[in-house]
Image: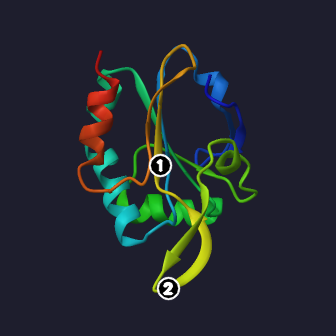
Amino acid sequence: MAPDFELPSSSGSTLKLSSLRGKQVVLYFYPKDDTPGCTVEACSFRDNLPKFDGLDAVVLGVSKDSLQSHAKFIGKYSLNFTLLSDESLKAHGLYDTWKEKMNYGKKYMGTERSTFVIGADGRIKKIFRKVSPRGHDVEVLSALNP
């Protein structure tokens, strides 16, 4: 079963993952609003949202950014799906996406870009780790299709 959590959402309310039972869920964790890879990934989900809707799937983006940061990101790129703010890293912990990373020889903690495809029954159907943002939407759509 997909671990349940409750987080503040860009829609202005709190979202509890289990409240979406009956729909498929694309839960994607990304490092930071308005950065190159994260923008590519978010815009590909935005552009293909009708295809996700056609499969009765909800797209949720999760980062540790604040709701204010999410609002700017959504406005700048006309994102048409919900972003969740996980400043406490609760959901990151449940899904094991907060990892030690290395950049230019320097170690730091950050979000491992990951996507979880959750079935209408609340069970995880597919996990994508260390995601490459380009073309990821196509991989996810294919995991949603029966």
Circle 2 — which element? loop
Mark 2, residues whose alpha carbon is within 10 Å: few (<14), some, or many (≥20)? few
Residue 133 drawn at (x, y percent)? 32, 56
Q: Quadrant of residue 11?
A: top right
The residue under label 2 is which amino acid type? Gly
Residue that label 1 marks: 114
Residue 62 drawn at (x, y percent)? 56, 50
Say left or right for 28 vs 53.
right
* Quadrant, the C terminus: top left
Residue 104 drawn at (x, y percent)? 45, 86
- Seen in the picture, residue 51 relative to 82 is either above or below; the reply is above
- The nearer-to-camera label among 1 and 2 is 2
Which residue is at a point 37% across and 54% down the rendered structure image?
A: 42
Residue that label 2 marks: 105
Q: Quadrant of residue 76?
A: bottom left
Mark 1, residues whose alpha carbon is within 10 Å: few (<14), some, or many (≥20)? many
Q: Earlier in the sequence, mark 1 or mark 2?
A: 2
